[in-house]
Amino acid sequence: MLTTGRRNGTLNHARMLILCLLVLPMIGMGKEGEFKYEYVGPAVQTKGMHVWGSSPVIGPDGKVHLYVARWSMETRKDFNGWYRECEIAHYVGDKPEGPFKFVRVAVPDQDGTFNSPHNPSIKKIDGKYVLCFIVNENDDLKTQRIVMYVADDLNDDWKPAAGAEADGTMLRKSTDPKGWNHSARLGVSNPSLIKHKGKYMLYCKSVVFPTPQAKKRKYVYGVAVSDKLEGPYKYHSKPVTPGNMTLEDAYAFSIDDTVYMLSRDFGASKGSTGGGLLWKSKDGLTFPGKDTTRAYEDLAHYVGKESLKNAKAYRGKVHGHLERAQVLAIDGEPAYLYLAVGVNTTPGFGSRSHVFRMTKNK
């Protein structure tokens, strides 16, 4: 006869086995990843500030320019400065691995209705530099929206995209009662822009309830499409990711006829809330769960748990969730991956970004 402890242990083991059997078919965990990631080291950190994400692009000077969300560590003890007093800063380095030096503030915090620019993503498309990011109104997350700026160079003389609102706002949550994110709880956020088969596709996240009866919210990705780079953009009728899988911080890129997204694994595989996933789509409108594979792991996987034992965790746990994936392509192929992490071993420095070499498996 089993003792109570052994019986409970057996039941818990059985529950975990059933959970794994339910989750594994959704994620192609047995497949070899299409890309491999080699850790290089820290990319950007700034004393007295939190750095959250680094979006790269190669400039006319041949250097690597990073557009970075950052805010002071001094104004508040928690991490919530990201939606209260964030700014987008411009750093530059001679090579993708860095080191990177601060150049200027590219998009300042204006408070009010154009508050706390955050989560920048930069691309060069059709000869123009395009900078997308989010803002909110008066620290209210329910008002999050996506702004699109364009420029011919990287001197930070940004202008609102032609099809946007006067301040550059390109995308808000849907005003159509039948729209997939019409009832989104936190507006629309975390943009990623690509050009695929002649169409311009602006991917975005919304926090929604999959059904009116659902009690648990989901972090879902959708896409807005345009025939013109500078818009306007119109929402596709459905989310692009499965309603039973939740994800965060997706970055889209395309190779030949395939659209990929790299995202934080927000509980879609093995019950994990760390590391990343690689999503695949032929049309950019549907990313099936069965074609999704595990990508990168937490920071401790690459640097060792021992090296992080004295780290300060400003966000997440000390093993370091890697988030805000942003890719640098060279000659049309993904070459470097930049990821944010909420831990730091250097006193006086907040969250920072790290860089990885990214290569396609043969």
Image (cartoon, helix red, strand yellow):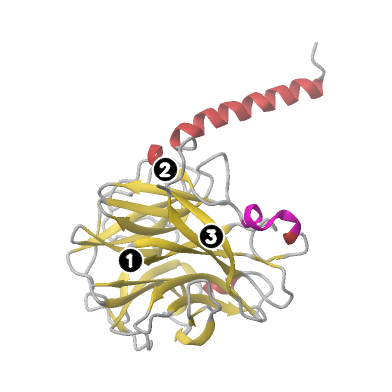
From the viewer's perspective, is residue 141 above or below residue 127?
Answer: above
Q: Which residue is mark 3?
A: 323
Question: Residue 261: x, y in percent?
Answer: 39, 54
Residue pointed to by mark 1: 331
Q: Quadrant of residue 203?
A: bottom left
Dot 3 crowding, Cα within 10 Å, few <14, some 14–19, many 20+: many
Q: Which residues are magenta?
A: 299-306
Q: Are marks 2 and 1 in contact (CB under 8 Å)?
A: no
Q: Mark 2 or 1, which is nearer the eye?
A: 1
User: Could you tell me which secondary element the residue under label 1 belongs to?
Assistant: loop
Please tell me how crowded label 2 is: few (under 14), some (14-19), or many (20+) other residues with Cα within 10 Å: many
Q: Nearer the viewer, residue 205 or 120?
A: 120
SS at mark 3 in the image:
strand
Residue 237's x, y, as percent? 25, 51
Name which residue type carries label 1: Asp
Q: Nearer the viewer, mark 1 or mark 3?
A: 1
